[in-house]
Image (cartoon, rainbow, N blue to C red):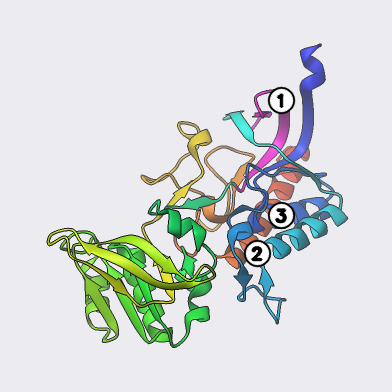
Amino acid sequence: MNIQQEVEHLQCLIIGSGPAGYTAAIYAARADLKPVIYTGIVPGGQLTQTTDVDNFPGYPNGVTGPVMMEDLRAQAERFGTEVRFGYATKVDFAKDGGMHTVEIDNIKTITADTVIIATGATAKWLGLESEEKYNGFGVSACAVCDGFFFKGQDVAIVGAGDTAAEEATYLAKLCNKVHMLIRRDEFRASKAMVHRVMSTSNIEIHYNTEAEEIVGDGQVVTGVRVKNNQTQEEKVLDVTGFFVAIGHTPNTDLFKGILDMDETGYLITKPNVTATNIPGVFACGDVQDNVYRQAVTAAGTGCMAALEAERYLAAKESGE
């Protein structure tokens, strides 16, 4: 087969299909950029693994993550976006702002005038079988997203860094008691965050403590079995919620050595915009946001990326 048959040219290619990618598609399609989305291995992103979303505007009664992603997809398709299952396997971005090349599934080549990256981030987990079993049914990697569901209850959170400290104090405002499990004998968080945790009366800190198993009744979480790694003593904490706050990994391996990123792998965009260090390549959502990591902020940056792509192409056409 002639290799030329496997090459396709697009005005706007969007890699990733969470709130950022779909919102970018809605705006790009309305601007007549005829965008094509490649969904990635997990169409809809992290939210497809979330049961209830109560904090996204426009859903007064809440919505499940998968239903919300289907709604966003349908809206993008309504304006002419083509959504395809597949993932980018190799990229060659033109540093001078020329034609960008992206390989899909190792077999198809796409050239694009603009590329919007919305590949998101993946939460780090402890790797417990029970953690996976109760994910969405008492186990969560986002206290800000799901803490509300545990109002007045006892919960546990794992982590020792700034994110864990911040989420623990957030949960303490909603929950009756927060058990904070720290593997070592000290925090990794900044002094200010440690002070905030220490000053919160309903946070109980368990040093040298590791979660061994999430305990449940087959439906929801009822506790967590923990072990002190110094004394080997085991006990079960009675909690209905278990939060993992040991960090996220941005899905940016594909762009290493090509796009600017920070020490943890998040893509660096220019101040107040979504432009990367390569002209015509934009990044939105959790792939460039290690602070907020919310569906609504991801959608906002998706909108920004599409508008910037449209303006970039208009300026290019007019020779500016």
Magenta-colored span: 96-118
Few, some or many residues within 10 Å of mark 2 (<14, 14–19, 20+): many
Judged from the image, the secondary structure of the residue bearing numbered disc 1 is strand
Residue at the top extreme of this rendering:
1
Q: Main secondary structure of the magenta part?
A: strand
Residue type, label 2: Gly
Q: Nearer the viewer, mark 3 or mark 2?
A: 2
Question: Where is residue 184 shown, x and y percent of the image?
Answer: 19, 59
Nearer-the-camera pick, 151 or 164: 151
Few, some or many residues within 10 Å of mark 3 (<14, 14–19, 20+): many
Q: Residue at x 63, y 42 (%)?
A: 41
In the picture of the structure, the residue carrying the numbered disc 1 is 109
Nearer-the-camera pick, 32 or 294: 294
Nearer-the-camera pick, 318 or 48: 48
Q: Quadrant of the N terminus?
A: top right
Tell me if 168 is positioned left or right of 199 in this view: right
Question: Where is residue 8 shown, x and y percent of the image?
Answer: 79, 27
Nearer-the-camera pick, 312 or 52: 52
Mark 3 to mark 1 CA distance (whole Å) = 22 Å
In the picture of the structure, the residue carrying the numbered disc 2 is 65
Judged from the image, the secondary structure of the residue bearing numbered disc 3 is helix
For the question of whether residue 92 can be seen, the reply is no
Tell me if 183 is positioned left or right of 112 in this view: left
Q: Earlier in the sequence, mark 2 or mark 1?
A: 2
Q: Which mark is residue 22?
A: 3
Question: Where is residue 132 shown, x and y percent of the image?
Answer: 49, 56
For the question of whether residue 216 can be seen, the reply is yes
Q: In the image, is residue 33 part of the stretch drawn in magenta?
A: no
Q: In the image, is residue 113 part of the stretch drawn in magenta?
A: yes
